[in-house]
Image (tube, rainbow, N blue to C red):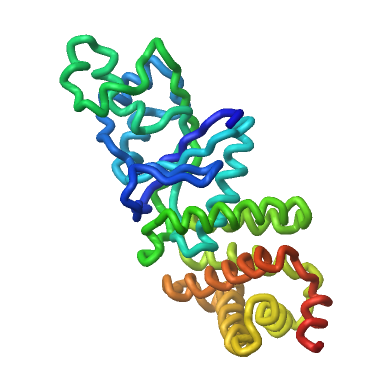
Amino acid sequence: MNGDTYYYPILFLIPDFSEQEVERPPVRLAKRRWITSTFDLATLATKHKLNLPYQVIDVFLSHCNLELCLNGQSSIEQANATFEAFRLGLYASGISPFIAPFITTHSINDYSGINSRDSDLLRDSLPPGMKEGVRSGEAILEAWPFELSLKCIVLENGLKISEKTLIEAVEKATAWIKLVEKYPTLRPVQDVVNSAHLFLWYHQSLLHLWSAIESLFPGVSTELSFRIAVYLAQLIGSRSKRLEWFEKVRAAYNLRSKITHGSRQEITEKEWHNTWLILMGAINSVISRESLPSEKELIKELLS
């Protein structure tokens, strides 16, 4: 595959596959195989191009079990856009929010052990699998900051990622990219999905999620709670589930209104998760429909 390759260490998620790595182009997920020593990172800092302190990388890697690789990217900007679409696909497939703190040009499994590989005296002491990898003078590793945070809203039941989930997420991301090209108003939805997990408080993140939900219906300016609940019930719910979705959205919107007007600030993870599921339901429906229906089209569906 032509183009460059970029690597994103993933915090908090747990690989749920037996192989060392699984792939569905352009995405590959690989288990972290080796410990990366402080000496390895110091070597990268002195002989390679780290655009963030190696001590920061050391802190982040203590929470990393998994690495995401993107192949065939024309630039780091395209890689980040692909990553954000894929992350949306993962979330829509039930995976918990997670953090990708930085990006590198080489795999963590290749630069781990670099300090010893650079030394003729220390190289032989490495385990067999670590003797091959990046060496200073033969290649230059570069790293860039991406999400420099350890604070993240995490859903405990969505931390394990399997090959099946990877395939589903890539398919959804591929469809989503085409939809964003056709409906540019979907881009703010992607931006919100990729940033809501970084808010320090649930109530702030919940309002951020609602900004994405409301952007799906730009024509709604009056009777917001009722009309948005009707549109989302029609967009997301099957015929037998529409009333259930309508009531769920009305309750979630009422909570949003209380937060907006200052009568509620402390909310629970479950309350936040309810709004998250509404947004994921809307995204999945748009993907399965292969279109973003207008308010008028949704009412026509409902009444026909």
Q: Is residue 72 visible?
A: yes
Q: Where the C terminus falls, by quadrant?
A: bottom right
List x then y, in percent, for residue 183: 77, 57
List x then y, in percent, for residue 150: 39, 48
Query: What residue sits 26% from the left and 22% below the top?
Result: 131
Q: Where the N terminus falls, by quadrant?
A: top right
Depicted 287 relative to depicted 87: above or below: below
Depicted 214 relative to depicted 223: above or below: above
On the image, which quarter does residue 217 sit in?
Answer: bottom right
Which of 95/132 is in front? 132
Which of 156/5 is in front? 5
On the image, which quarter does residue 206 sit in?
Answer: bottom right
Compared across the picture, whether 99 is left or right of 54 comes to right
Query: What residue sits 43% from the left and 16% below the top?
Result: 139
On the image, which quarter does residue 262 sit in?
Answer: bottom right
Compared across the picture, whether 64 is left or right of 276 comes to left
List x then y, in percent, for residue 107: 40, 32
Outermost left residue: 125
Query: What residue sits 30% from the left and 28% below the top?
Result: 112
Which of 35/258 is in front? 35
Query: What residue sits 71% from the left and 58% below the top?
Result: 186
Q: Is residue 195 visible?
A: no
Compared across the picture, whether 139 is left or right of 117 comes to right
List x then y, in percent, for residue 148: 45, 41
Q: How many marks?
A: 0
